[in-house]
Amino acid sequence: MESVLKKYFGYSEFREYQKEVIEEILQKRDCLAVMATGSGKSLCYQVPPLVVKKTGIVISPLISLMQDQVMALKQRGIRAEYLGSAQTNSTVQSRAESGQFDVLFMTPEKACLIPTSFWSKLLKVGISLFAVDEAHCISEWGHDFRVEYKQLGKLRDVLFNVPFVGLTATATEKVRIDIISSLKLKDPHVAIGSFDRRNLFYGVKSFNRGQLFINELVGEISKFVALSGSTIVYCTTIKDVEQIFTSLKEEGIKVGIYHGQMDKKAREESHRLFIQDELNVMVATIAFGMGIDKPNIRQVMHYGCPKSLESYYQESGRCGRDGIASVCWLYYTRSDFAKADFYCAESKTENQRRAVMESLMAAQQYCLVTTCRRKFLLNHFGENSSTDRCGNCDNCIVLKKERDMSREAFLIMACIQSCRGKWGLNMPIDVLRGSRSKKILDAQFDKLPLHGLGKGYSSNWWKALACQLISHGYLMQTVHDLYVTVSVSSKGEKFLSSARPDYQPPLVLPLSSEMVDDDKHKSKSGEAEEFKSLATFDCEGFSEVEAQLYQLLLEERLKLARGIGTAPYAICGDQTIKNIALTRPSTKARLANIDGVNQHLLVTHGDHFLQIIRNLSQGLNLSLDGEASLRTAMTRKVYSLPNQQMNNLTPAKFEAWKMWHEDGLSIQKIANFPGRSAPIKEQTVSQYLLDAAQEDLPIDWTRYCDEVGLTREIFSAILGAITKVGSTERLKPIKDELPEDVSYAQIRTSLVMQNRGISSEVITASCQNTWNADQLPNTVPECSLIPTSICSMEGPCEAEASLKNSVAHCCFEKNEETAPVAITGGRGLKLSLVHDEDPLLKKRQKVSTVEEGSSISLKATESSIIEWLKNYDGVTLSDILEHFDRSEEESVVDLLSCLEGNFFIYKKNDVYRVM
Ligand SMILES: Nc1ncnc2c1ncn2[C@@H]1O[C@H](COP(=O)(O)OP(=O)(O)OP(=O)(O)O)[C@@H](O)[C@H]1O
């Protein structure tokens, strides 16, 4: 699974829920995945076909959506196609039935109408899964019910034994049950993710219709586009779409238009241009909907309140699908809330009308809340938010002004009560504002003592206050067929009973933006200032030139995409480009290591990318393979070899020694020094230093032992193992005598120290390892067996002394279930102190077990490494070095880089695996 993920998608980690769903599908279990938009549901059906190498069928509701997905999959080297009315290639169906595609998309109509012979032929070659994307369309309770989806359950009997998978981003419990029964899912694995889109900022503003506001909006959008990229502006009417489109166009912005009255061709063209980044902004009605699969939309604006919170969540959720910070702004006017009649027009029953009204009320409430908007949204979808302040919505980041509104609250609540709770908000507010309309006179509300007492505030101000009182539980709304009434709740009654016209208990409430505007507490420019920071490019961790490089790389990706007629995001995501701008890889191996770089990208465009990175970095004076902190701290020096004769010291070794000895760099820093074509292993650097020592160059042994983690105890154990083995010709038998966590670097160091007569006294006593005395290997032999050079050392260290008193020939073997077990009496048994929780050690253990007894020295070649790696589920570099012990570490590392760069192998957590 993981090699498929890296090879085809370029990612190194699965996201939450992906792995479990894929594993269940591979076990042939039916699944239902309810995961937020952009959470990565597609991967759940894209990976299994590539793992089992059998076609996966995916039902998708829209041709445009299928076409975009096919385009993106092809860019990853995945054999994908679609079947549906728009498919002009007549060979697709016959190629599909012989299993020539990894992923085959179909409309529900096509899946139901295609002859059964198609399925039987395909079943013969094998079907890995039958996935139904946007599965909520199956349910009449869902917001996008599609009658053709209902028929899909029939295929359950035809595709017996094929795992069925339903995927959706929005599903209430009712819809979930409907999906399971309609698709006839058998004991499905249900994965329900969070609806929280943490990378999305939510904000709401009220506005007054008119060109003045549109100009302001256009200004905001152009600032945003210049910094951050794609924006969608959703409008509630075609008139608004046209007006905003024209204004943006006049401003010189690359803008597209999309609505239901355009002809199909024009709509498709608009869609294509936006997807391919040829347009920066799309102004559209919600007709520009479900088919948008573009992951790098950075902003979704709603010009007008949407009809429900469900549709708002869906529409706003189209931004930031790649996980990068993105923003969702909703602009509303009070008149948006009076559209119930319009939205209810198509509802036939009272229940349906009530549902529409309730949805609209929830959207209205979302606009008006002064508390955390994310929490409000999540609560609406039945999910609890872990915090009251998300820190990523306007209400959380802009401190709302608060003030005591007890008098105003008293007035409106008392007035609602006086009007006997039979009205919506308009009547009591008109009464408070002193209206003498016919309705008021007829009801004799002009006689009420409260009449005219609220003249000082606008009608919208009172509505905003009422909304606050609703969300704080003082007032409540009741939905009737086509109207809503507002009444005082028991909490409100309590407040009223403890208040008098001249005294009210304090009631401090935050001022919503409408109230602030009305109160004239805040200037217009003040508000613009507050939100300015949100429309900035998210350049965390970027220097100014790196941000420049990022923009240039985006342009290069666009050019490349144009050249091959695809969307830039299909080549690689924005996050991948960010990582490239930050690390500026100089070799294919380094490029391959970047998250999001897949094999197809590397093979097809790798050289081109490397060339661009090199040129652009050079132009901007940025080093390649950069690590910000190191890069600024130092520049790479060129060392020349001293004149003296040093047969075994190559320039690379000498350079490493100089960097360590003279510049004081650690082994780790030298290994990762920027400017290398690829980082070398720390073991390689430590070996270089040992080689330098053998050439009589001075080494600070105390510092060196500290860096390679050689303690006196380990040193002593190694000497013991050397004596026991009786030869230093090969390191493996010595290593086998030692605990797993003793490294080759430590063994080599001990050998060189032994050769050069360096005493263990040089090792700082404080350099302790974690072995307990009773865990220490009891391999220290009788003193007489220790080679003279060791015996000549000045006095044994504490550990050596304690070892001498221990029982000889006692060792530990790894017990899979429990802690290490002591086994006595064995001869030459392996000693393996295993930390059970460390999976890497387990892997090494597996390898060394297999290798036991092997005494043939092997040389590494590309094919021998691959062949050998095939036998294991993950092997570390030291395993490889141990196995191919006739090859120099440096050349093994080079070979591995090469294999990695060509996607034959991949590395994760320092473990190598075959693709
Ligand atoms: N494991 C992963 N690591 C990094 N990125 C990922 C991973 N899985 C998916 N993505 C990326 O996340 C983005 C959204 O994924 P995807 O299109 O599958 O979302 P989705 O849940 O299907 O959304 P929607 O409901 O809108 O269809 C894509 O750009 C995808 O490449």
Image (cartoon, helix red, strand yellow):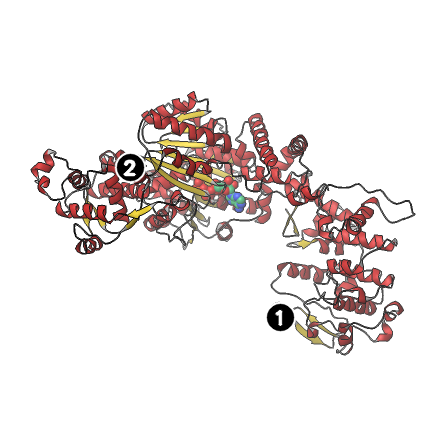
Is 807 left, or right, of 162 in this rendering?
right
Residue at 35% in and 26% down = 212
Is 409 left, or right, of 694 in this rendering?
left
Between 215 and 484, the residue placed more toward the observer is 215
Between 233 and 862, the residue placed more toward the observer is 233
State which quadrant residue 450 falls in.
top left
Circle 2 sits in a helix, a strand or a loop, which is it? helix
Does mark 2 have its CB less than 8 Å from ligand 1? no
Question: Does any portion of residue 122 appear in the rendered image?
Answer: no
Q: Which residue is mark 1?
A: 819
Is 680 left, or right, of 405 in this rendering?
right
- Residue 778 at x, y = what percent? 75, 73
Mark 2: give few (<14), some (14-19) or many (20+) Cα within 10 Å.
Answer: some
Circle 1 sits in a helix, a strand or a loop, which is it? loop
Does mark 1 have its CB less than 8 Å from ligand 1? no
- Residue 481 at x, y = what percent? 18, 42
Residue lying farthest to the right in this orientation: 645
Mark before the other along the chain sequence, 1 or 2: 2
Residue at 51% in and 52% down = 23
Residue at 87% in and 75% down = 784
Count of picture labels? 2
Question: Does any portion of residue 797 appear in the rendered image?
Answer: yes
- Residue 786 at x, y = what percent? 85, 71
Q: Which residue is mark 2?
A: 518
The amino acid sitting under disc 2 is Asp
The amino acid sitting under disc 1 is Ala
